[in-house]
């Protein structure tokens, strides 16, 4: 069979026919593709709407269940504060006693306090963990000291439940031009008093017992910490010294202090009577 010449009309007709068929096929595939995409988008939108509709309904039902089960007296619904009934309070019988959980070192402690519209009043620690911890409350009841009697770590919690560590990490000696760190000194000298027996003298002053500024001596000193500015807590040494110092109760004239088995009164102006 004779093949058509590339210059003949018959050959041109075959080429045009072939191009037409190819064009038809391309258009057909394009139309099918567009139709598929449009319908798939509709199907996808439909499924998505149904899914979110079901999810919204489920969330709505869940909220209804939570509201039905909520009890304002249930302690499980309270986050940071736990309410427990106040058996008797001569200041205000209508107030509730609250519990604030605070983590100090490796221990979680429960602080008891009362709260009204204006402020809170601390009541003390619920558990001192077998006397591992001791506490003291400021005269206005808006601050509480918590002391670890083993490590001599001392913390203060204020009226907005912020926690501050009072014992300094190191002592700087001007004469030696050197820093002496608490852990190093306590590991070197047995029963060394770094910051112990902390008590409130007034709302902004804490007094404590320390062997500082000496090492290897038995003599103790009364120190004071100014907590009026919690961003700039300062420590000051007083001239009151003795081989054994223990603080007693706070009175309207000052705090009682036993120095070498002799009871004294440390006034608010740091005069020893």
Image (spheres, helix red, strand yellow):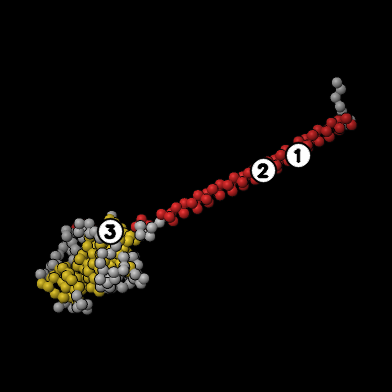
Q: Residue placed farthest to the top in the image?
A: 1
Nearest to the eye among marks 1 and 3: give it. 3
The residue furthest right is: 9
**Figure label count:** 3
Dot 1: few (<14), some (14–19), or many (≥20) neighbours within 10 Å?
few
Q: Residue at x 44, y 52 (%)?
A: 65
User: Closest to the observer: 166 or 263?
Assistant: 263
Q: Judge by depth and name the residue closer to the eye, 236 or 161.
A: 161
Which image quadrant is residue 261 in?
bottom left
Residues at marks 2 and 3 touching, judged by CB atoms closer than 8 Å: no
Query: Horizontal placement of 97 versus 214: left or right?
Result: right
Q: Spatial distance from mark 2 to mark 1, Cα to Cα?
A: 18 Å
At label 2, counting other C-alpha atoms closer than 10 Å, the crowd grade (few under 14, some 14-19, many 20 or more) is: few
On the image, numbered disc 2 is attached to which residue?
A: 39
Work out how far the residue at label 2 is from the one at label 3, CA to CA, in angstroms.
Answer: 63 Å
**Residue 82 image-quadrant placement:** bottom left
Residue 239 vertical position relative to residue 16 in the rendered view, above or below: below
**Measured from the top left, where is residue 26 in percent x and y?**
75, 38
Residue furthest to the left: 261
- Residue at 13% x, 67% y is 244
Label located before the other in sequence (2 or 1): 1
Q: CA distance from mark 1 to mark 3?
A: 78 Å
Residue 127 seen anywhere in this rendered image of the structure = yes
N-term mark: 1 or 3: 1
- Upstream in the sequence, badge 2 or badge 3? 2
Q: Position of residue 132 (x, y in %)?
A: 21, 58
Say whether marks 2 and 1 touch (CB < 8 Å): no
**Image check: 264 left or right of 66?**
left
Q: Which residue is mark 1?
A: 27
User: Could you say whether the residue bearing mark 1 is in a helix, strand or loop?
Assistant: helix
Q: Between label 2 and label 1, give the one nearer the viewer.
A: 2
Q: What residue did someone put label 3 on?
A: 109
């Amino acid at each position: 069979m004779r093949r058509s010449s590339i210059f003949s009309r018959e050959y041109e007709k075959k080429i045009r026919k072939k191009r037409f068929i190819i064009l038809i096929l391309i258009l057909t595939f394009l139309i099918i593709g567009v139709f598929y995409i449009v319908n798939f988008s509709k199907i996808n939108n439909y499924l998505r709407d149904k899914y979110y509709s079901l999810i919204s309904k489920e969330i709505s039902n869940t909220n209804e269940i939570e509201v039905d089960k909520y009890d304002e007296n249930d302690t499980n619904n309270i986050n940071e504060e736990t309410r427990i009934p106040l058996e008797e309070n001569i200041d205000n019988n209508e107030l509730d006693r609250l519990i604030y959980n605070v983590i100090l070192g490796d221990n979680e402690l429960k602080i008891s306090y009362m709260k009204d519209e204006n402020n809170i009043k601390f009541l003390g620690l619920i558990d001192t963990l077998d006397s591992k911890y001791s506490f003291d409350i400021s005269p206005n009841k808006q601050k509480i000291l918590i002391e670890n009697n083993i490590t001599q770590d001392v913390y203060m919690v204020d009226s907005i439940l912020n926690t501050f560590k009072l014992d300094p990490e190191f002592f700087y000696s001007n004469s030696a031009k050197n820093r002496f760190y608490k852990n190093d000194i306590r590991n070197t000298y047995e029963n060394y008093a770094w910051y112990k027996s902390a008590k409130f003298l007034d709302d902004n002053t804490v007094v404590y017992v320390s062997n500082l500024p000496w090492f290897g001596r038995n003599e103790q000193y009364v120190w004071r910490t100014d907590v009026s500015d919690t961003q700039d807590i300062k420590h000051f040494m007083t001239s009151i010294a003795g081989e054994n110092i223990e603080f007693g109760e706070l009175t309207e004239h000052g705090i009682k202090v036993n120095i070498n088995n002799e009871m004294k009164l440390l006034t608010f102006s740091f005069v020893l009577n």
